[in-house]
Amino acid sequence: MEKLSKELIGASSTPIILSILSKNESYGYEIIQNVKEISNGKIEYGDGTLYPVLHKLEKKELIESYWKTADNGRKRKYYKISTKGKKELLAEKENWTSINQIISKLWKIEPSLT
Amino acid sequence: MEKLSKELIGASSTPIILSILSKNESYGYEIIQNVKEISNGKIEYGDGTLYPVLHKLEKKELIESYWKTADNGRKRKYYKISTKGKKELLAEKENWTSINQIISKLWKIEPSLT
DNA sequence: TTTTTTACATCGAACTTCTATGTATATTTG
DNA sequence: CAAATATACATAGAAGTTCGATGTAAAAAA
């Protein structure tokens, strides 16, 4: 039930958010809940954390946003992944695979004697 | 042959360095070469990048250092992992496993219809 | 009617990596 | 023998990050 380290959360935020948006459009608040659920509470973005990340991704043109008013009258800023974002997601997947290979290689060779 | 992203390099540096030092004592310059080799050139720390990381780990008491003069007369600062560092490495492994589960879960469910 | 939840935004503190710069010595090349 | 390269460590400044705090606003629940 441990929370993940800052570094890992930072490194994973872009691929996680892009992955979520590659399936469905979503908005900030919902993404926070979604990630919390998927990660079994191990990743809990604060709102002050997620929004700047979304703005950064939008600035890089990996995602696009538009305002929508929900049935209940609430205003939400919806985000969707862009073509550029899909390419970036692919690259991120490759990166992730690489680092995993490197790390698992390092750990497998590790001697059993502590 | 792509280089890895900054974020991933950052997130992996602590577990990678601790892993290397859990097998053998080593020094900065050698660690840089070692990581480059293990990662097939995908991770290339600059010296200005690695030394501050080593200092940080030492400050946190995860590793210890001592000066040693090699046969050729060169001075090297050797680092070894501490008991605290070994515990930290275990924790890092768990973190890494967690984030991998989260991410692979996200990617497996991904629909084929774009 | 008050509190909680939903929803977004920004600011400053703290921390990181990276590039550049500096020092110094051993080894290799011309 | 001189010059260039490789070895070896250190630090400073720029740029980028996360996070907690604070602010605004409205809907839903107590």
Image (cartoon, coloured by chain):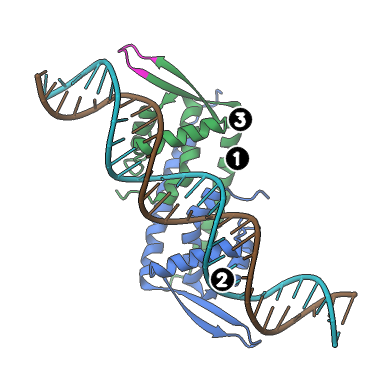
Chain colours: A green, B blue, C brown, D cyan
Residue A90, compared with residue B47, is above or below; it is above
**Residues in magenta?**
A69-75
Task: Tell me if mark 1 has few (under 14), some (14-19) or many (20+) residues whose alpha carbon lies within 10 angstroms of its own.
Answer: some
Characterize the local packing of mark 2: few (<14), some (14-19) or many (20 or more) Cα atoms within 10 angstroms: some
Secondary structure under tag 1 reads helix
Chain containing the residue with disc 2 = B
Q: Using the image as rendered, state which of residue A96 and residue A64 is in the foreground.
A: A64
According to the picture, the residue beneath numbered tag 1 turns out to be: A91
Give the main secondary structure, helix, strand or loop, of the magenta stretch.
loop
Does the residue at mark 1 contact the one at mark 2 (Cβ under 8 Å)? no
Q: Which residue occupies 58% across, 50% down?
A: A98
User: Closer to the camera, B68 or A88?
Assistant: B68
Q: Nearer the viewer, mark 1 or mark 3?
A: 3
Is disc 2 placed on a helix, strand or loop? helix
Residue at 60% across / 40% down in the picture? A91
Work out whether B65 lies above or below C1: below
Chain letter of mark 1 equals: A
Left/right placement of residue B20 relative to residue A38 reads right
Report, in whole angstroms, how far the alpha carbon at label 1 lies from the one at label 3.
11 Å
Q: Amino acid at mark 3?
A: Lys
The residue tagged 2 is B28
As measured in the structure, the alpha-carbon distance from the residue carrying label 2 to the one carrying label 3 is: 38 Å
Query: Does residue A74 show up magenta in the picture?
Result: yes
